[in-house]
Image (tube, helix red, strand yellow):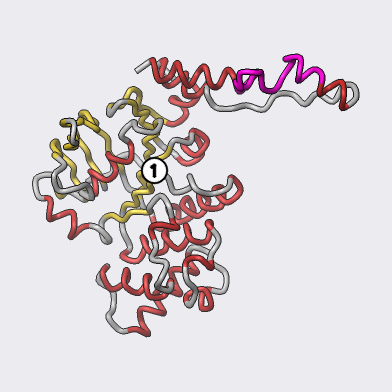
Amino acid sequence: MSEDGAATPLLDVEDLQIEIITATGVVRAVDGVSFRVDRGETVTIIGESGSGKSTTAMGVLRLLPDDTVVSGRVRLSGVDVVADASAAARLRGHAVALVPQDPMTALSPVHTVERQMGDAIKVAGGTSNRAERRARALELLEAVRIPNPAEKLRCYPHQFSGGQLQRVLIAIALAGDPRLLVADEPTSALDVTVQAGILDLLMELQERTGVGILMITHDLGVARLVSDRIHVMSGGRFVESGAAAQVVDEPREEYTRNLLAAVPRLGEFDDRGTAGERAGRVAGGGSGVDAGGAARGGSAESTENTERAGSAR
């Protein structure tokens, strides 16, 4: 994790604004956010869908459409990529790399993993020698704990599980030894047990290499586990920022409190009576789902709190 006294931050964002041109007018998707990521630190931007968190990440990487208006200041390893948009292309893969959200759409279905990893290694400034690229690809797959890497190199994406594909994407991101990883919802398409393995891998890589991580997620559980600092985003703005423990355990803003309250919680298991009696209690409204379809107990409270979170903006 981060240490005080770090020199130049890996990422330093000041008053970032992003305006998107649409058929109905200009939409300000990001409205004046500021944050930084230091070496060995994980900073998480969390928010509901449409809050602007992924747009912020893509703006930092300068991967938005050409007609998008980006203003403010974004320094990647000291270089302002807002003032010089072409600098971002030179830095991507070296100073910073992206771990995309959906591995099934991020990889080409008609090329082997070896071909796609080899291209990434070559673009990142690696060797053009095929044997050397293969050796580097094997090294990267081993680093992300892919079993039988020599065999897996010859496979196509559809022959991998979702968790393995996410590991392949992380390996590709590491091809150029970046100092900063931007992980855009890296576990959203995965089962909970697989999510834990991916998060453990990212933390292990950070511990070993000192890479900084900008994590984008809507999952409070993920944010709680991996973050040094959390920024809660709504409507293109940060509504609360602070150390992870403070934001999760002692939130100051109503919006953050409502987001936390909206996390589903399991109720106590009721094994009293026969199966028929339990079914009768459910049908009578003691628990479960009512006639209107709204879940009761913790689920109904979660729905109500989610609605309050939206109205708290």
Q: Position of residue 6 (x, y in %)?
A: 28, 44
Q: Main secondary structure of the magenta part?
A: loop
Side of 1 relative to 288 (left or right): left
Whether residue 25 is in magenta: the answer is no
Give x and y (percent) for residue 37: 30, 42
Q: Nearer the viewer, residue 209 or 247?
A: 247
Q: Nearest the camera: 67 or 266?
A: 67
Is residue 110 positioned above or below 190 on the image?
A: below
In the rendered image of this protein, does residue 155 appear above or below residue 177? below
| Element on which disc 1 rests | strand
Q: Amino acid at mark 1?
A: Met
User: In the rendered image, which quarter is residue 252 located in?
Assistant: top left
Q: Image check: 308 left or right of 64?
A: right
Residue 298 lies in the magenta stretch: yes
Total label count? 1
Give above or below for 215 relative to 308: below
Over which residues does the magenta segment extend?
Answer: 280-299
The residue depicted at 39 percent of the width and 38 percent of the height is 44
Of residue 133 and residue 112, the one placed in the foreground of this image is 112
Circle 1 residues within 10 Å: few <14, some 14–19, many ≥20? many
Quarter of the image containing the N terminus?
Answer: top left
Q: Would residue 74 appear left or right of 104 to someone viewing this image?
A: left
Which residue is labeled 1 in the image?
A: 215
Q: Residue visible at 55% across and 61% down?
A: 161
Query: Which image quadrant: the C terminus?
Result: top left
Q: Residue at x 37, y 28 (%)?
A: 232
What residue appears at the point 39 percent right and 31 percent down from the top-left corner?
47
